[in-house]
């Protein structure tokens, strides 16, 4: 069966290369390109480096993850990818800031305000704000979604005084979580629980501030005729690091979660670069800090106009067979767009099947790095084979390369490559996620 599927995938690649590529180069006319570039040998090579003991579990905020970032960047360079900003640096660096309040004092119209009714989201150790500070005054009114609007104000990139109606008194304190981990910025947002609209106010805050550098790894293949339309392929390269020994092993290698996804991203980058016929710009991303809050994908998403992102293929845990066996995987949020239908149509005749997510109650669509862009309307889905009812190595020291089916994983990567061909060619565009359904 595997030989038959292998032959069908090669045949499908032949038709793709014959019909969709410009004549004249050996690479573009070679019907076995997909097998040459995406091979079990290369999949194993990349997997064994990313999931090696030398990486020590690739935990975010540790030196160990830097080794993985260096390796991924080198793979992108070897593949011939460009950097996102054209500066030759594949690292998309950013800083997370964690704060601990020391003192807060406030007054409005000369009257003191209880410090518990003030929450300041700022990266500065000391901040003083008054009516002369030039802060824009905005409101969260009764009936609004407190958390949704608060997050939108923080992402707005403005200095804001946010007056929160007292109908939110019971949940106002939850906004303090917004300052526990934030991206470093020179903008500040002050939330005050009040039913007034003060013309005079004084707010002072002191806090302890610690900074934590992080970096995604990003490579780009510019599009030909549609450079400003983006298709993203992603996986997260962090895992959970080193823990208590279990039978003498203390390294959580994360071979399936998610070295498998990053391996797929590297293979797809090499394949599409070799193919050389993408009309849309392709962005290949290895996210950091998925395991500790999804900070990498959140930062990455803020660098793009979501209206220009045509699709996102996020790849998570494809190293084991799905619940349907070999030559199959599932797509989270399948019913939210027609992207899965488009992908499956491009696989006709291969024997490979992309199924809808069989675990809807687990809300997987919202639990991986696709979620941030999906919430902005992008057809952003995660592809996985994880058997959520029975993944014996998930977040355990036993998640190493020996537990993976690398032959099947290689076929999955090839199938993703073929299924995306109409989208990267600009001939097919998935429907957008209806944002109002996600709130």
Image: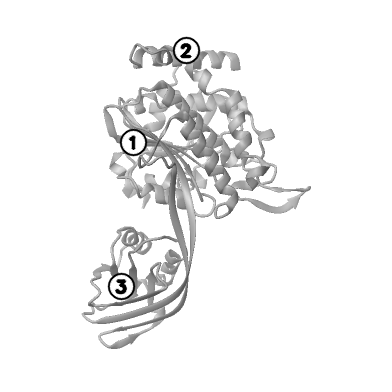
Relative depth, front residue between 17 and 315? 17
Q: Which residue is mark 3?
A: 165
Mark 2–mark 1 Cα distance, whole angstroms, equals 28 Å
Element under disc 3: loop
Which-is-in-front pick, marks 3 and 2? 2
Relative depth, front residue between 147 and 399? 399
Which quadrant of the structure image shows residue 191? bottom left
Q: Which residue is mark 2?
A: 11
- N-terminal-most mark, 3 or 2: 2
Q: Position of residue 377 (x, y in %)?
A: 33, 44
Q: Are marks 1 and 3 in contact (CB under 8 Å)?
A: no
* Label number found at residue 107: none
Residue displayed at 49% across by 43% down: 360
Residue density around tag 3, few if under 14, some if 14–19, many if 20 or more, within 10 Å: many
Q: Are marks 2 and 1 in contact (CB under 8 Å)?
A: no
Q: Which residue is mark 1?
A: 230
- N-terminal-most mark, 2 or 1: 2
In the picture as drawn, the residue positioned furthest to the right comes out as: 247
Q: Could you tell whether 164 is left or right of 9 in the image?
A: left
């Amino acid at each position: 069966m595997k030989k038959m599927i292998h032959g069908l995938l090669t045949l499908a690649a032949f038709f793709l290369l014959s019909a969709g590529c410009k004549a004249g180069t050996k690479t573009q006319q070679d019907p076995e390109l997909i097998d040459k570039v995406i091979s079990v040998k290369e999949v194993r090579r990349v997997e064994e480096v990313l999931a090696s003991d030398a990486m020590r579990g690739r935990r975010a905020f540790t030196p160990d993850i830097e080794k993985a970032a260096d390796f991924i960047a080198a793979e992108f360079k070897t593949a011939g990818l460009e950097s996102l900003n054209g500066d030759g640096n594949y690292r998309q660096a950013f800083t997370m800031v964690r704060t601990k309040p020391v003192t807060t004092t406030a007054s409005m119209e000369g009257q003191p305000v209880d410090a518990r009714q003030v929450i300041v989201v700022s990266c500065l150790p000391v901040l003083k704000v008054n009516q002369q500070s030039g802060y824009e005054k905005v409101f969260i009114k009764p009936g609004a979604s407190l958390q949704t609007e608060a997050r939108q104000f923080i992402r707005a990139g403005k200095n804001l005084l946010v007056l929160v109606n007292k109908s939110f008194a019971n949940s106002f304190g939850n906004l303090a979580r917004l300052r526990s981990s934030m991206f470093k910025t020179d903008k500040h947002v002050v939330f005050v629980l009040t039913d007034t609209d003060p013309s005079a106010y004084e707010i002072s805050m002191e806090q302890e501030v610690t900074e934590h550098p992080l970096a995604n790894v990003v490579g780009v293949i510019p599009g030909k005729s549609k450079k400003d339309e983006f298709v993203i392929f992603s996986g997260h390269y962090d895992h959970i690091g080193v823990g208590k020994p279990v039978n003498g092993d203390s390294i959580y290698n994360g071979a399936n979660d998610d070295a498998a996804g990053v391996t797929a991203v590297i293979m797809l980058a090499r394949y599409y670069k070799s193919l050389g016929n993408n009309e849309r710009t392709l962005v290949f991303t290895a996210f950091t800090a998925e395991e500790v809050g999804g900070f990498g994908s959140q930062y990455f998403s803020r660098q793009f106009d979501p209206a220009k992102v045509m699709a996102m293929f996020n790849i998570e845990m494809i190293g084991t067979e799905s619940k349907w066996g070999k030559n199959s995987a599932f797509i989270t949020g399948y019913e939210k767009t027609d992207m899965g239908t488009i992908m499956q149509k491009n696989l006709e005749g291969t024997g490979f099947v992309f199924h809808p997510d069989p675990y809807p109650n687990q809300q997987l669509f919202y639990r991986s790095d696709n979620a941030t862009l999906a919430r902005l309307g992008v057809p952003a889905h995660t592809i996985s084979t994880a058997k959520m009812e029975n993944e014996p190595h998930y977040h355990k020291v036993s998640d190493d390369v020996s537990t993976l089916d690398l032959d099947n994983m290689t076929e999955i990567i090839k199938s993703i490559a073929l299924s995306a061909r109409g989208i990267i060619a600009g001939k097919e565009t998935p429907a957008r996620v209806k944002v109002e359904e996600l709130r």
